[in-house]
Image (cartoon, rainbow, N blue to C red):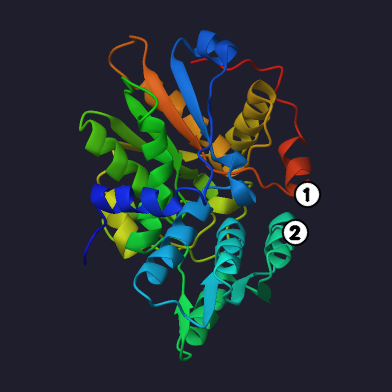
Amino acid sequence: MNLPNYLDIESAQLRLRSHVKETPILSSHLLNDWLGHDIFFKMECLQTTGAFKLRGAYNFIAKLAENNALPTSIVANSSGNHAQAVAYAAKKFNIPVTIYCTKTISPVKAAATKFYGAKILTFDSRLQADKAVAEASRAIGCVWIPPFNHPDIIAGQGTAANEAFSKIDGLDAVFAPCGGGGLISGTYITAKHFNTNIQVVGAEPLNANDAASSLRSGVIETLTHAPNTLADGAATPSVGEYTFEFIKQLDGFYEVNENRIAYWTQWLQHLLKMHIEPTCAMTMQAVADWLNNQPSKDKKRLLVIISGGNISADSMQKVWKTDYLDQIPSL
């Protein structure tokens, strides 16, 4: 198995230039004062298609183009953000796309995916969708673009952190959500290239904790049921063999319950004045837990990857079912 490295991320950065936004980095003076640390947010919610996923999808297809190996059709399996990314990127290369997903796909993400020209096929479960896309990918001239478990996807996702590290000095740690593990893997490669002492920390929903279960057992574990979580972008049944190799090397990994996912979604939307998905907002709980576990209380400089901003009205209602804005963030 040939794992991606930092040279792959640099190559991806060149392919994405002029095609993918260099998203801004924001911070909240109020949050920094409350927590006593400097926290920087890489705003991938402002990316084209509304999430970091475009980086991996575009890198995958652009690399095929470099090698004169563009397919006649593309298939992908996704709960939403990867679907939009693949549909958008493939449209740039005039390649038809079919997306395989569950019936619970966010209506917002499904509508955007169709707008970019993709056909959507829905199934009762993620495992059924994954099986169907694997069968479809056997057609002549067809290429399957996986959501996370591929070196070119991981390399593309790593460009988000790469942009941030070129702008911010002296970081102590970087945090990212973990669904299938593509983003946290690319972030790990990038961070360790810049400074091996930088801590890289992941977070996932407690209700969809396949990665944490895999870390505890030492082998890839698969969820036996469709998870019920606000963080739909991290509701993958399992990580992949590529991403697990990086997840095992992380400096920390935290499981976040639904109340804290809603809590941080409300607070980040309020403080940053941005439409932020629960999947990445939950990462702030990992920040709080990590800071509380540090032996030194010296001020830290932290980077958080805000991975997306595509939220359905139904999810927003669930997030705001209880108002947490009367509970000021603290450590």
Secondary element at image label 1: helix
Left/right of residue 116 with respect to residue 34 in the rendered view: right
Residue 229 seen from this side? no
Location of mark 1 (residue):
314
Residue 299: % across, % down:
37, 10
Look at the picture and state if 85 lies above or below 168: below
Check disc 1: other Cα within 10 Å, few if <14, some if 14-19, many if 20+: few
Which of the two discs, 1 and 2, sits closer to the camera? Answer: 2
Q: Amino acid at mark 2?
A: Pro
Residue 107 tag number: 2
Look at the picture and state if 87 lies above or below 160: below
* Lower sequence index among marks 1 and 2: 2
- Closer to the camera, 33 or 96? 96
**How many angstroms separate mark 1 from mark 2 (CA)?**
9 Å
Image-quadrant location for residue 110 = bottom right
Is the C-beta separation of discs 1 and 2 under 8 Å? yes
Image-quadrant location for residue 194 = top left
Q: Residue at x 54, y 56 (%)?
A: 235
